[in-house]
Image (cartoon, rainbow, N blue to C red):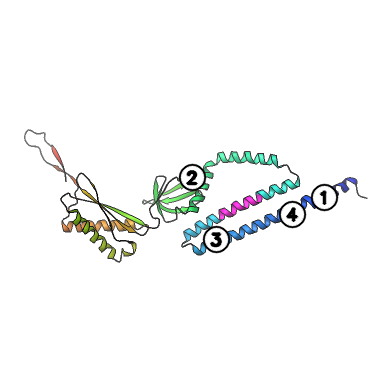
């Protein structure tokens, strides 16, 4: 003969199993189905990205994004499911939610910079404003992007120094190699020079450079002549620019500058520069006096 308390306990368990137990089972099955669906969706997104993105850097960015989406979805599913199960078991969730809220608030205050870095990094990856290999200027630092993560961006400047920039302080991005690039030339010539002739010479130099097979693949368009830009103290400034493939504008610009100097020397086109003439003083003047002239 069973004890009365045991009989009562079994009846309560049977009653709970027929009501709350079924709901707990349904919640558990729903959690398993949602987690499986999330896993499959993330895999499909990853395969889709890998089939359409051109390089390993873009695929790595897509992989990071899909991992973040997967982890966030898992946390949400497990948190909501666990609270529903605890509610069916009979545990009062109000103290737990209050403690979780206070704990989350304390963690948020203590790690607000980290949270800001992660959120900013997610949107940087999502918008694809910065990619590995780009030459950018962010937070007063410029260099080649070596790595883009959720928390920070790694740059290497021209001297080889590595800069780690937290994503949370990136409020403005200057990307110098997005899609295509320009190298802008500000050419100063003497006031006595015929500016129309000088501009024609510059166009010829750029055409010769573009015809050179060593540089032809990196130059996208003919020289764009912007015209006489301004009048400086000792020179007339002519502005023009060349459109190049990303990251090659400096290489093309250096070669163009070299050819401009050689061609101007050969054609007698003066590139003025400030200079100083020293002479010994005449009787009645202070010895060692000098005069300054500007070309």
Residue under label 1: 15
Q: Is residue 174 magenta?
A: no
Marks 2/1: CA–CA distance: 54 Å
Query: In the rendering, at what x and y percent does residue 243 appear?
Result: 33, 58
Residue under label 4: 25
- Residue range highlighted in magenta: 67-78
In the picture, the disc for residue 31 is none
Kindly report which numbered mark, 2 or 4, lies closer to the viewer in this rendering.
4
Marks 1/3: CA–CA distance: 46 Å
Residue under label 3: 46
Query: In the rendering, at what x and y percent does residue 119 appear?
Result: 52, 47
Count neighbours of disc 4 (C-alpha within 10 A) and say few if under 14, some if 14 to 19, many if 20 or more: few
Query: In the rendering, at what x and y percent does residue 277 appear?
Result: 14, 43
**Relative to residue 91, is residue 178 drawn left or right?**
left
Marks 3/4: CA–CA distance: 32 Å
227 or 38, nearer to the observer:
227
Q: The residue tagged with tag 1: helix, strand or loop?
A: helix
Q: Is residue 75 magenta?
A: yes
């Amino acid at each position: 003969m069973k004890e009365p308390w045991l009989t009562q306990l079994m009846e309560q368990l049977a009653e709970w199993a027929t009501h709350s137990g079924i709901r707990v089972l349904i919640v558990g099955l729903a959690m398993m189905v949602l987690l499986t669906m999330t896993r499959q969706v993330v895999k499909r997104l990853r395969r889709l990205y890998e089939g359409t993105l051109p390089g390993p850097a873009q695929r790595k960015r897509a992989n990071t994004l899909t991992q973040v989406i997967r982890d966030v979805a898992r946390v949400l599913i497990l948190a909501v499911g666990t609270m529903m199960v605890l509610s069916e078991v009979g545990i009062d969730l109000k103290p737990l939610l209050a403690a979780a809220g206070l704990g989350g608030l304390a963690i948020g205050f203590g790690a607000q910079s980290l949270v800001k870095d992660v959120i900013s990094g997610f949107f940087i990856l999502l918008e694809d404003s910065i990619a590995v290999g780009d030459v950018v200027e962010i937070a007063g630092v410029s260099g080649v992007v070596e790595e883009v993560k959720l928390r920070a961006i790694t740059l290497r400047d021209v001297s080889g120094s590595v800069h780690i920039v937290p994503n949370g302080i990136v409020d403005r991005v200057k990307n110098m190699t997005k899609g295509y690039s320009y190298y802008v030339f500000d050419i100063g010539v003497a006031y006595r020079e015929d500016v129309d002739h000088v501009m024609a010479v510059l166009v010829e130099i750029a055409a010769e450079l573009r015809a050179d097979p060593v540089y032809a693949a990196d130059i996208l368009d003919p020289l764009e002549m912007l015209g006489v830009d301004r009048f400086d103290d000792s020179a007339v400034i002519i502005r023009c620019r060349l459109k190049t493939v990303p990251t090659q504008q400096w290489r093309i610009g250096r070669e163009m500058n070299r050819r401009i100097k050689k061609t101007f020397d050969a054609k007698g086109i003066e590139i003025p520069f400030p200079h100083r003439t020293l002479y010994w003083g005449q009787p009645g003047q202070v010895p060692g006096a000098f005069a300054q002239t500007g070309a």
